[in-house]
Amino acid sequence: MKEISETDELKLVEIKMKVVPKESQREPDDYKKKIFISKLIEKGKSLLFTILGLSLFLLFWSFITSFTKGDLPGPKATLTVLFEMLRDPFYDYGPNDKGIGLQLMVSLTTVLKGFLLGSIVAIPIGILMGASNIYRLLFYPIVQLLKPVSPLAWFPIGLVVFKDTGMATVFIVFITSLWSTLINTAFGVSTIPQDHKNVAKAFGFSKMRYLTKILIPYSLPHIITGLRLSIGVAWLVIVAGEMLSGGTGIGFFVWDSWNALSLEKVMSAILIIGTVGLIFDKIFTIIENKVSYK
Amino acid sequence: MGYLEIKDMEISFPTPKGKYIAVKDINLSIAKGEIVSIIGHSGCGKSTIMNAIGGMIIPTGGTVFLNDKKIKAPGPDRGIVFQNYSLLPWLTVYQNIFQAVDAVMTCSKFDKHEIVENNLKMVNLYIHKDKLPGQLSGGMKQRVAIARAFAINPSVLLLDEPFGALDALTKGTMHLELLKLWNLDNREKTIIMVTHDIEEAIFLSDRIIVMNDGPSATIREIENVRIPRPRNKLDIVNSPEYRAIRDRLLHLLTDKFSIEDLGIKYKN
Ligand SMILES: Nc1ncnc2c1ncn2[C@@H]1O[C@H](COP(=O)(O)OP(=O)(O)OP(=O)(O)O)[C@@H](O)[C@H]1O
Ligand SMILES: [Mg+2]
């Protein structure tokens, strides 16, 4: 082994002396300011790229518009109509002429009803499937069989059972909302570490205490992820569902505008649908971050 | 029959390569109020034996009796400190202890609160009671686990390397706290402890169980520690009994004592 000579040691000392104090050891105010500025730069950067991406999208859109020789309305025409629609969103001129705000409200209510009912069913079944082999064996084949079925195929069944198009639309959203929540919940519950189970066993936790202090806190992030995916798909499905059911809702609005040959309205509706979907996703992402304990 | 009686115990685990026998032919009789240490190389099956006494696993052969009753499951008569602490990461230090106390004890809510606070003070973590386990150091987590086991006031304490992550000073304090607790109850609590620390084992125990290496580990030898109590850490190290036991344990657990034993010639 190479021995450290005296001069080497001196060099070491020199190096140690030269080490710059860490950020946190400097003036605290100075440090805070630096953090703030670097965060600001980070925010500005991401904003810049968002704007860049959107501009690229608009450019592409204009290109398609000119390619179709104006059959597809361009960004400018669409945005004009969109602002028009948003100026008075809640007007109501009878059953076939309602403002976009009212249509959106109808769709949102339908989605939330179906999603809530679906979650109320999916979470407990998911917990049972994750916690016990018997329930997994019992439910898993059914889930595998029904999950790949397009939610729209359930529409006739909803109609037969409920004799009401509104209820039938809620029903297809309900079915759609089941799968992701169910599978993610079951996965979360089935991966509870042995360590946590040992605590419950060693200290004789009751079923209720196990559920509220171990099972749910551990699987909550998974459950929320399931809910986030579910509401995303539910929102996808509602547009198609309302095209089938007709009458009201954002999906009906799209179909109605297409029949009235108002493509600007169709494009505007697409922008609105996208924005609402984005908001749903953001809300659940925020909750997801809140409930993760690590 | 002893208070805690292990008879012909064998514990094996199913593995992809077939049955793995961790320990076998374990016979041990422990009296009420005794402090016993288990010492042995890593992987020899110390935690496995502790788990069997705790009722966390059922031996594949033989039986464990506690107070003449066969152990089939964990119970409030046994407090376990797991080797890996096993705290719930979403509960605060206070809640980690409280949930155990609340599950086991039948006293009033106020009394439970008192119990938790007293035990937090005992392990010197009272000011950290609202922190989450992720915000604690290894030694602090270990002390939370100790406070949790103590708090349910069990008649048998099963401590799996309870002081392994502590610095010498905190460790010393914890040793005295353990003995204080034991003394408080007319020395009726039985304490079984896994440790790698020979000095700790001698200072605390009435008997030290030395294990063979696995697989199929058995008890190699049992050392009686006849140093009178109360023991004084400073005084006992000079006593001939202490030295004799320490040397015997060192020889049992170590076969090489210097780099020269590795066949290396040390040049001056
Ligand atoms: N659940 C299990 N499945 C398979 N093998 C296991 C299981 N638990 C323990 N073993 C095996 O049993 C043996 C003893 O393990 P144990 O945890 O009791 O060792 P230990 O003496 O506590 O070691 P350490 O000092 O490192 O904690 C090891 O070889 C381990 O691989
Ligand atoms: Mg161990």
Image (tube, coloured by chain):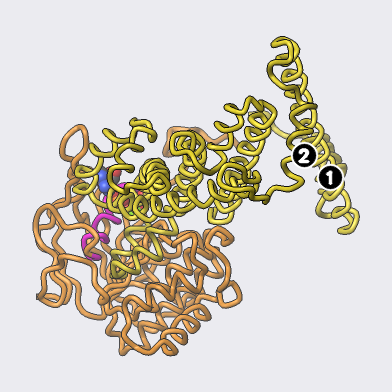
Chain colours: A yellow, B orange
In the rendered structure, the answer to whether residue A87 lies left or right of residue B234 reads: right
Q: At numbered mark 2, what does the secondary structure look like: helix, strand or loop?
A: helix
Q: Please state the extent of the stretch shown in magenta in the rendering.
A: B42-54
Q: Main secondary structure of the magenta part?
A: helix
Image height of A148 relative to A113, above or below? above
In the rendered image, residue A49, in percent from the top left (x then y), is placed at: 78, 30
Chain at numbered mark 1: A
Residue picked out by circle 1:
A40
Q: CA distance from mark 1 to mark 2?
A: 31 Å
Quadrant including the C terminus of chain B: top right
Residues at marks 1 and 2 on the same chain: yes
Image height of A17 relative to B151, above or below? above
Residue A178 in view:
no
Question: Mark 1: is the Cβ under 8 angstroms from ligand 1?
Answer: no
- Can residue A157 be found in the magenta stretch? no
Question: Residue drawn at (42%, 47%), measured in percent from left and top?
Answer: A166
In the rendered structure, the answer to whether residue B142 lies left or right of residue A179 reads: right
Say which of A12 and A84 sits in front.
Answer: A84
Say which of B176 and A23 sits in front.
Answer: A23
Question: Residue drawn at (21%, 57%), measured in percent from left and top?
Answer: B57
- Can residue B43 be found in the magenta stretch? yes
Say which of B93 and A235 sits in front.
Answer: A235
Q: Of the residues shown, which amino acid type is indicated by label 2?
A: Phe
Chain at numbered mark 2: A
Residue picked out by circle 2:
A83
In the rendered image, residue A71, in percent from the top left (x then y), is placed at: 69, 16
Q: Of the residues shown, which amino acid type is indicated by label 1?
A: Leu
In the rendered image, residue B238, in percent from the top left (x then y), is placed at: 45, 72
Mark 2: give few (<14), some (14-19) or many (20+) Cα within 10 Å. Answer: few
Q: At numbered mark 1, what does the secondary structure look like: helix, strand or loop?
A: helix
